[in-house]
Image (spheres, grey):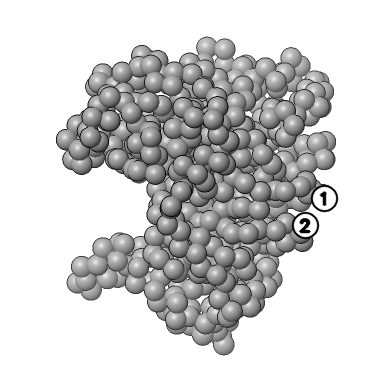
Amino acid sequence: MTAEAILSGRTTLGIELGSTRIKACLVDAADPATVLAVGSHEWENRFEDRVWTYAIDDVWAGLQAAYADLLADAERRHGVRPRTFGAIGVSAMMHGYLAFDAEGELLAPFRTWRNTTTSRASGVLTALFGENIPLRWSVAHLYQAVLDEEPHVSDVRFLTTLAGYVHWKLTGRKVLGVGDASGMFPIDSATHDYNATMLEQFDQLVLERAYGLKISEILPEVLVAGQEAGRLTEAGAALLDPSGDLQPGAPLCPPEGDAGTGMVATCSVAPRTGNVSAGTSIFAMVVLERPLTSSHHELDLVTTPAGDPVAMVHCNNGASELAAWVGMFSRFAAVTGGTLSSDDVFEALFREALDGDPDAGGLLAYNHLAGEPIAGLTEGRPLFVRTPDSRFTLANVMRAQLYGVFGTLALGMRVLDGEGVEIDRMFAHGGMFRTAGVAQRFLAGALDAPVAVGETASEGGAWGIAVLAAYLAVAEEATLDDYLRERVFRGADFDVVDPDSEDVPGFAAYLTRYRDGLAVEQAAVQAL
């Protein structure tokens, strides 16, 4: 039965280009909760000429490798390989700068969300719009290029995100899902399109420095979840599958950012719901019941894939530093003759953290590999700090490292608390939540809110965009929220952890030291 569904294309394919992995996920179109096959490919960003970037050739090599891995997995599980799909979706890291000329040639190396060189542009645009424009947003990168008088600016004819770029090459259409678009330029919640007043303000701002630049003419068309966003062309099929087996013609849903697919993957697109996604970066998305009372540099105003307003707390640094520490312990286990896998070491160290003191024994861990705007850091310097009277144990070291992943996030979430934003439940997803009950418990303590983790916690955005692709077929019958609650997550098993009575004040004490210790981080950036 499953083999027949795969061969006949009664499936949807989701592809997500994350910070360290490109993932592909195949689901049953009629029951998207059922994952039929997965594939992945590891890749890493590069820091070249002081710019965080990925080579465009690596995008396609990675996509092809992840797709081939999915085909092999489908054959292992079901004895067949798909050659067509009911629908396809593409997701990727949000924000950044991908600028093309009239011939479709890339004008500058891809500048990812991780770059923090746009502070001047961000400040000007925030003041102009009266709305926080973060350093990583595409419009900040564009305006910084104008301010820096980069010669390529006069040739820009199309500006998009990584998901928008891949979708364009697969379909020929220059479009973007509203959630991803909201990380390029502010969105008007009433129209689900770019804010028209701000578009005009931007054009006036650059009139003398970049005469002829009309931002509305270079941004992708905005679409909402459920709208068809083109079909796979022959050229697009060949890009994804050079073997020639993949057939063109499948419809694609609007390409989305990893924030939007994370919301879908955690069934958190309705007001008073939110989610935390932890990977190379970590961010929280909280769907708003009402507008915020004022602008805050810690909060981005973005949208769900359906266009509803969301407050986003985005931190450039997530679990990479934690993974580096686990890697060191893995190497220690290997040189002493141990046979533990990396997953085993993660499990053991996470479990050890449960025995740590509620405040991590006075230890501090900063995970800042890159600059962190919320913390006021233009560059990153990972640090581990203790005082002579700190309780320096393995349990406290690991608890401090886990707390450190949530440190900057918690600073931003405290701002939401001050706005009176209420959350019924936070959903969490990402690889660090695979060890049941550890990172989830500490996050509940950090946010002082129940945290739920579902079976798809480690599948993440690739599954989320596959679900959005499946939604194409039923969008006229149900809202996205209804579709998720009643069809995709109906009967889903969520493990919910309430805040521990000792963890909440313990993390609060840790966060106070963390905030005070940022002066040490800033000194390290200046001195090292």
Disc 2 and disc 1: Cα gap in Å?
7 Å
Give the mark count: 2
The answer to whether 228 appears left or right of 148 in the picture is: left
- The image quarter containing residue 412 is bottom right
- Placement of 151 over or under 381, stated as above or below: above
- The picture places residue 56, in percent across and down from the top left corner, at 44, 29
Q: Quadrant of the C terminus?
A: bottom right
The answer to whether 105 appears left or right of 447 in the picture is: left
Q: Amino acid at mark 2?
A: Glu
- The picture places residue 212, in percent across and down from the top left corner, at 74, 14
- Placement of 521 over or under 173, stated as above or below: below
* Residue visible at 62% across and 25% down in the picture: 222
- Placement of 382 over or under 212, stated as above or below: below
- The picture places residue 41, in percent across and down from the top left corner, at 33, 41
Q: Nearer the viewer, residue 287 or 201?
A: 287
Circles 2 and 1: CB distance less than 8 Å?
yes
Residue marked by disc 1: 293
Q: Residue furthest top?
A: 103
Q: Amino acid at mark 1?
A: Thr
Identify the secondary structure beneath mark 2.
loop
The answer to whether 11 appears left or right of 260 in the picture is: left
Residue marked by disc 2: 419
Label drawn at residue 174: none
Q: Nearer the viewer, residue 277 or 364?
A: 277
* Residue visible at 50% across and 64% down in the picture: 496
The answer to whether 242 appears left or right of 263 in the picture is: left
Mark 2 residue crowding within 10 angstroms, few (<14) / some (14–19) / many (20+): few
Q: Quadrant of the N terminus?
A: top left
